[in-house]
Image (cartoon, helix red, strand yellow):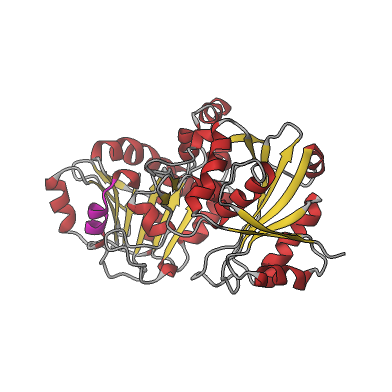
Amino acid sequence: MTAPFRLNDSQREAVRLLGGPARHILLRGGSRSGKTFVLVRAVVIRALKAPDSRHGIFRHRLTALKASVLRDTFPKVMRMCFPQVGWKLDRQDCVVTFPNGSTIFFGGLDDEQRTEKILGLEFATVYLNEASQISYGARNMLLTRLAQKTDLAVKEYIDANPPSMGHWLYALFESGIEPKSGEPVGDRLLYATMILNPQANRDNLSEDYLASLEALPEREKRRFLYGEYQSVVEGALWRLEMFRREAAITSQSRADVAARMRRILVSVDPSGAAGPEDYRSDEIGIVVCGVDAAGVGHVLEDLSARDSPAGWAARALRAFDEWGAERIVAERNFGGALVEGTIRSVRAHASVKLVTAARGKAARAEPVAALYEVDRVVHHGRFTALEDQLCHFSVSGYRGPRSPDRADAMVWGLSELMLAGNGGMTGWSSSGFSLAR
C-alpha cells in the first residue's frame, strides 16, 4: 500500500498562504524547492472544487512547460495527492479535463498564435511558472483573462527563482510598487510572497544535489539555494562575492565569539517609526559589530526592526547586555538628544555615544566598503536584508527603494570600531559619549 502523501512544514505554510485572502501570490526560492509541486496541487484543488471552472498554467516557452510541468510535475501531483481522481489529456491542445468538467490549460507565451488562443478564454486561476522569464506585459495580458465567474475567488499564482531587483516581480511583490508607473499598489493585502528553499525539501533531494548548490559561486548560490534577489546597481560599493562568512551566532556560541572580540558595539540608526504597524516609516537599524585582536571587523547580529521608541531602545539594550558590549553608538542627526533620551528612558545609566553625519551616506560608506575589499570584515551568518542594502550603495549614492537603515547602522558601528581616529573617516565627527554612573 502506498503511504499517504505528506507536505513538509514549509509547504504546509505555503498552502495556508495560497488559501488566504491574497489574490496575487508569489512563491520564490531556490532550485527544486517544491514550489511548482505546491502550486500545481493548489490549481488542481481549485479545479476539483468548482465544476466547469477553467484554470491556466503558463510559461514563456511551451516546450519547457510541457517537459517540466505537463509531463513531469502534473502527473506526479495527481499520482501522489489525488490517486482516486481520473483525468484526460488532450495532447494537441494541451488541456487536462476532470470528471466534473473543469479544465487546466497549459500555454506558452512565446508564440503569437498561442497568445491569441489564450485571449479567447477566461480563467478562474492563472499560474505563471518560472515568471522570471515572463515579461510584465505578458503577465498583464494574462490578468485580463482572469475573469471567469465561479464560486472561487480569482487568483494569480506565480513561482520564480528570484531574478534581479530590477525585475517587475521585485517591484510588485517586495516593494509594493506598480512597475510601470512607480505608484504604490492599490491594496498591499492582495499581494503576498513566501520563500521556499531546497533545504526544506531535502527529503526529496539527494545530498549530492544539495552539495552542488552549496558549491556554487556566491551570486548563483544566493539565487538557486537561498532564493534571494540579485542586486543590479552600477558602480556598487559592495558585491556579493565580498562577503566573508563564519557560522551564524547561536545562544550557545555567543559567549565564545564575544570572547574573541577586542571591542563590541551596538549601533543604532533611528527612524521616525511609531510602532510595528507604522509601515510609512523606515525600520530602526540595530546592528551588533565587533573587532578582534587582529583588527578584523565582525558583523555579529542584525536586530533591526520597525518598533516604537521604547521598543527599539529595549531591543538595543538587550543586545548590549547579551554581548557585553562597550557602548551603544547612535546617530544624533535624527532627533538629536531625543535619541539619547529614548535610550535613557529605558535605562538611565546606559553608555551611549552620539555620532553626527557630516557627509552623505555613500561618502560615509566608502571607507567601510574598502575594508570588505581587503577581507577585513566577516559576517556571522547570512544577513539578507542588510546585504541587499549594502549592494544598493554606489559611488554616486544609495540606489535602494527605501532608506538603508540596517546598512547605516552597520557603517556607524564598523566606522567607530575600525576607522575613527585613523584618518579613514574625514568629515565624520562625534559629539563624544556620555556615561552616567
Count of numbered badges drawn on the protein:
0
For residue 115, above or below residue 21 = above
Quarter of the figure with the N terminus: top right
Q: Could you tell me residue 131's position as x and y percent?
A: 33, 47
Whole-percent x, y for residue 164 in the image: 38, 44
Say whether residue 292 is left or right of residue 8: right
Whether residue 208 is visible, yes or no, is yes
The residue sitting at the right extreme is 437
Closest to the observer, 166 or 159: 166
Q: Tell me which segment is drawn in magenta.
A: 134-142
Residue name at image x 78 percent, y 44 percent: 254
- Horizontally, residue 64 falls left or right of residue 165, namely left
Magenta run includes residue 135: yes
Where is residue 345, by image quadrant? bottom right
Q: Is residue 158 left or right of residue 216?
A: left
Foreground of the two, 5 or 18: 18
Look at the image and tell me whether residue 31 can be seen.
Answer: no
